[in-house]
Amino acid sequence: MQSSLTLSLSQPATALTIPKSNYTVNHSLPFHPSKPINLRFCGLRREAFGGFSSLSRSQSLQSKFRSKKISNAISASLSDNGSAPKSFDYDLIIIGAGVGGHGAALHAVEKGLKTAIIEGDVVGGTCVNRGCVPSKALLAVSGRMRELQSEHHMKALGLQVAAAGYDRQGVADHANNLATKIRNNLTNSMKALGVDILTGFGTILGPHKVGYRRSRDSPFNIVTAKDIIIATGSVPFVPKGIEVDGKTVITSDHALKLESVPDWIAIVGSGYIGLEFSDVYTALGSEVTFIEALDQLMPGFDPEIGKLAQRVLINPRKIDYHTGVFATKITPAKNGKPVTIELIDANTKEPKETLEVDAALIATGRAPFTDSLGLDIGDLIPHLYCIGDANGKMMLAHAASAQGISVVEQITGRDHVLNHLSIPAACFTHPEISMVGLTEPQAREKAEKEGFEVSVAKTSFKANTKALAENEGEGLAKLIYRPDNGEILGVHILGLHAADLIHEASNAIALGTSIQDIKFAVHAHPTLSEVLDELFKSAKVKAHAPGSVSEPVAV
């Protein structure tokens, strides 16, 4: 594990590449591999990057890891103040108070480290303020609306409900109030443990040295620490040619405020963000058109789960779609004219058609937010770590927190390496989708390279008593595994509370538990957890297979 971060391109033979995680919605980002960027991340080994693409030098370094406005000042600072201080203000400074920074701070205090966290916006970062927290509030509303609007579902349960309606501002207030509550909880938890919260935008000024200030015109407040963690999160990625006005052409940041519910909205990108917002908008009465650059919807999902999701989440709803096309130009509504979207063929680049809609949501993924850090090409800063969305490995809040904890373990003397294949992901549609590990194509590609066999087991929610009692029998759980030793390679679920069910599989992968061991676990009856129980018991492991898989794989 390396305790430094460098943006040098001088040694491509030994450099690690920044991966584009297959668990994020970044499938629409126009990142094309060229030369690798030498970034060293805590808890990430070289094996973790196999099969992933690197960010291009031109797009990632210029737009993500360089701050043109202050690069000269920072370079001067590095040359003038490059020596490390002999004593430090803190054991650990964290730049960014999102979920990742918060998790790292709490674990650092537990380990006895004097800790400070720097935040220039508000505590909670992307997840709490502009991501997973407010979006779950909106999705909770959409779930209730779907249930109340389904006459067949209500009748099957013997219920009679009058026509369901909603108050847009009330829904928006619910999302905002939840974000405020969670933000206050995070702030209070850090204060209670003695974490110093420093307000301002953090910049690396040299080894062990961080400056923070409220604006570019303000002087730096300088603090020092033995170790520094970058946890600055991400921002919505907006492709070239798209004009965002925040009203009729919006990103997820704007959409979460729910300032309007358009009659017809186009969603550019059909990953997690796009799929979840389609669930919200259609439940509230909008018609949705997906625009996807690849040839199929939901390209980041296991193909079998993606097909089922299209049948359940898209085809029955007021949703149509265009695949294999780029939105090269999107113009906001002006002077009574609608939003216009110019589409071209993704392969031939020939013009296809122009759509006119009431609004457009740009859901093409997120990009690391590192502009204000002052890191320039060639800077090698010791004891500097990067976690969460800022490193681009896996853009999930819980992954950021896990990486932050891994950093703290490393700097306090434990050689801890996080297995990213054991980190679950979920899409909170109705029904939900969740996954951990490899998709079936990824597993078969790995098997072909390494010379082992892959098997697949499946079970249906239609066979689960609790799901049937809820009248929610639509769903599938899929297990991808090695029949020779019982190793779990991946689990994918679509169905009621799939996001909660995935953790049994996630923990099994993390602990290296084999199928032949976990199939003896006892599950309460009748519960949805029996979906996983039946899944593991239906797997056919060869009789001579060992009782357990070897040590958990560190990835």
Image (cartoon, rainbow, N blue to C red):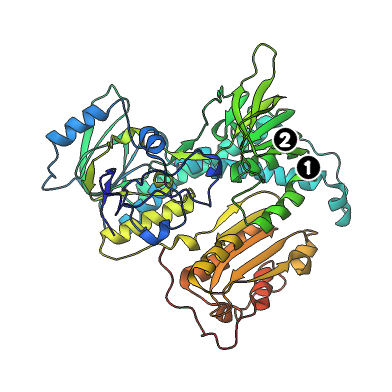
Helix, strand or loop at label 2? It is strand
Q: Quadrant of the N terminus?
A: bottom left
Give whichever of 2, 534 is nearer the camera.
2
Q: Work out whether residue 180 can be spotted.
A: no
The residues bearing labels 2 and 1 have C-alpha atoms spaced at a distance of 9 Å
Taking the view exactly as shown, the residue that stands out farthest to the top is 335
- Residue 244 coordinates in the image, percent (x, y): 55, 24
- Residue 191 coordinates in the image, percent (x, y): 35, 46
Callout 2 environment at 10 Å: few (<14), some (14 to 19), or many (20+)? many
Please tell me whether residue 528 is drawn above or below residue 72 in the rendered image: below
Q: Say which amino acid is labelled 1.
A: Arg
Q: Residue at x 32, y 25 (%)?
A: 215
Taking the view exactly as shown, the residue that stands out farthest to the bottom is 544
- Residue 485 coordinates in the image, percent (x, y): 53, 80
Q: Residue 550: which disc? A: none
Marks 2 & 1, CB-CB < 8 Å contact: yes
Give whichever of 427, 267 is nearer the camera.
267
Please tell me whether residue 87 is drawn above or below residue 415 in the rendered image: above
Residue that numbered label 2 is attached to = 288
Residue that numbered label 1 is attached to = 317
